[in-house]
Amino acid sequence: MPQLPPVDPVAADPAAVASSAVASADAADVLRTAVSASVRVRTVGCTSVKTGSGFALDAHTLVTNAHVVKGAEQLQVDTWDGHQLAVAGSVTATVADLAVVSTREELPATVPLASADPVGGEAVTVVGYPHGEALATATGVITGPVDDPLHTAAAQVLRLEAPVAPGSSGSAVVDRSGAVVGVVYAGATTGEDAYAVPVSTLRAALAAQGPADASARC
């Protein structure tokens, strides 16, 4: 039988161990909500199929990117536990690369929006479906607001150090409390940096959104 190493009395302090366990449990609960609210968005177009990510705001409303739903003849939404939900329609924003999708069936969970944009140095987690495959999380840090490198947003966007990939577009960027502080819309070619629409812009887009469009775009 392998021999256990000597116990470090400092590391084994009951209060420290309990505090660490509680913090881990709290973090798991916070992340569980964001995971349960995440969806995979599949866009079936006239000549192609592409995938992205999204997250639920309420029982029948989810957020993703405008470029994810662009050219859709049909939108398919898959929940984290494998259920496919029928889509009623979608509407794209004019202020940033954002889209709001309405579902006919209820989404399994929702995630709250943060009240303010994150600050530089703040730890965040990206929750989505890189490569359109399994749901995944990636930890990162906000490196600050910057001008939109793709010129799709009227205001500044967030740059963060976090690994993303094709399929991550529309992923929620959540803070330590589990609230959404941004929506991923682009990544650097190195895969080490990502760009996200800040929650303040998302709130403005939601306030200005028009009626959902259920028509095909071919």
Image: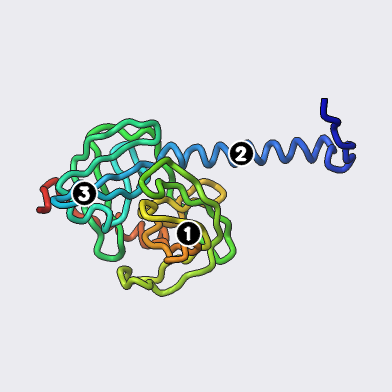
**Which residue is at a point 21% across and 56% down the rendered structure image?**
70
Q: Which mark is residue 90?
A: 3
Residue 89 placement (x, y as % from top left): 19, 45
Of all residues, the one furthest to the top in this rendering is 1
Relative to 110, 99 lies left or right? left
User: Which mark identifies residue 116?
Assistant: 1
Where is residue 194, by image quadrant? Answer: bottom left
Identified by mark 1, the residue type is Ala
Return the x and y of residue 217 as percentages of the image width and height.
Answer: 12, 53
Q: Which residue is mark 2?
A: 26
Disc 2 marks a residue whose amino acid type is: Asp
Left or right: where 214 falls relative to 178: left
Q: Position of residue 124 (x, y in %)?
A: 54, 54
Q: Position of residue 178 (x, y in %)?
A: 51, 46
Report, in whole angstroms, how far the alpha carbon at label 1 lies from the one at label 3.
Answer: 26 Å
- Judging depth in this view, the residue of 1 and 179 nearest the camera is 1
> Label 3 sits on what residue type?
Ser
Q: Are marks 1 and 3 in contact (CB under 8 Å)?
A: no
Spatial separation of the CA atoms under disc 2 and disc 1: 22 Å
The tag earlier along the polypeptide, 2 or 3, is 2
- Find numbered disc 3 in the image and state the secondary structure of the residue it sits on: strand
Q: Residues within 10 Å of mark 3 (few under 14, many from 20)?
A: many
State the residue in front, 135 or 91: 135
Residue 85 against residue 189 in the figure, above or below: above
In the image, 89 versus 12, the foreground residue is 12
N-terminal of the two: label 1 or label 3? 3
- Disc 1 secondary structure class: loop
